Amino acid sequence: PALEKDLAACLAGQMRALSAGPAKLPASPLWQWGGQHRHSPLFQQALTQRRLPSFGEPVYLRRLSGGGTDLLGAWWAACQLLAEARELVGAEPAQVQLAACREGRKYHLTLSVVFANRTNAHLSVAPHYFSPSTDLTLLGSGGLIFSDNTANAPQLIGSSGVHLCPPAFLHPEPAWIQHFLEGA
């Protein structure tokens, strides 16, 4: 709850700061937020595949992420999905529509986006946290890039049900933090 106050104190003390999401603070070269997706193997592989000539031009992107456990988390997750989508489709948003609902403290947000290159996207933040979010579909004029959260994770099946065990290397946060600490 005191994130903005803490960030403001860091910036006033000329300390570099990294946060997962935005805050109502003026831009500063000392403060960075977001960008975790750039360190995700899923994002890196999807971007590499999207850049292949055989993929063609992006047409449609669908992306699901967790993070809707509270309003601020849902908003941050939506901002991060939009930043990731901009890089994946290689264009700026031309139109964004937001639909949201909540039940108690849980939020579900969906951004419907039309990009300047005419790519359409549906970016959804679910009220539950999927760690890490590996649900991605990117359709191009010549190919399809697809990753499914349940199909790509090892599963433990027992008397209490199915438990997904995504490999630790899929988490982008350690590489993201290391990149920040190295001053890049």
Image (cartoon, helix red, strand yellow):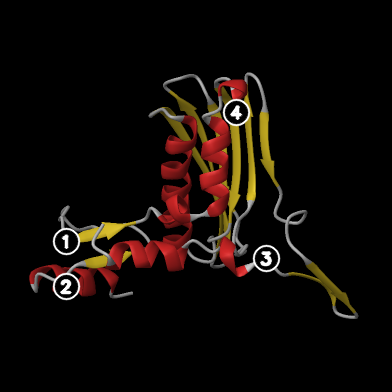
Badge 1 amino acid: Leu
* Residue 122 sits in quarter: top right
Residue corresponding to mark 2:
10
Marks 4 and 2 sit apart, C-alpha to C-alpha, by 40 Å
Is 92 placed above or below 24 here? above
Q: How far apart are marks 1 and 2 (CA)?
A: 9 Å
Q: Residues within 10 Å of mark 2 (few under 14, many from 20)?
A: some
Q: How far apart are marks 3 and 1 (CA)?
A: 33 Å
In three-dimensional space, the C-alpha distance between marks 4 and 1, rounded to whole angstroms, equals 35 Å
Dots 4, 2 in contact, CB < 8 A: no
> Disc 2 on helix, strand or loop?
helix
Mark toward the start of the polypeptide (4 vs 1): 1
Q: Which of marks 3 and 4 is in front?
A: 3
Circle on res. 166: 3
**Quarter placement of the N terminus:** bottom left
Please report contact status of discs 3 and 4: CB closer than 8 Å, yes or no.
no
Relative height, residue 160 to residue 129 (above, below): below
The answer to whether the residue labelled 3 contacts the one labelled 1, judged by CB atoms less than 8 Å apart, is no
- Identity of the amino acid at label 2? Cys
The disc at residue 30 is 1
- Report the amino acid beneath label 4: Tyr
Image quadrant where one finds the C terminus: bottom left
Q: From where the camera sits, is residue 23 visible? A: no
Identify the residue shown where x is 61% and y is 24%: 55
Assign a secondary structure to mark 1.
loop
Q: What element carries label 3?
A: loop
Side of 116 where 124 appears, left or right: right
Residue matched to label 4? 60
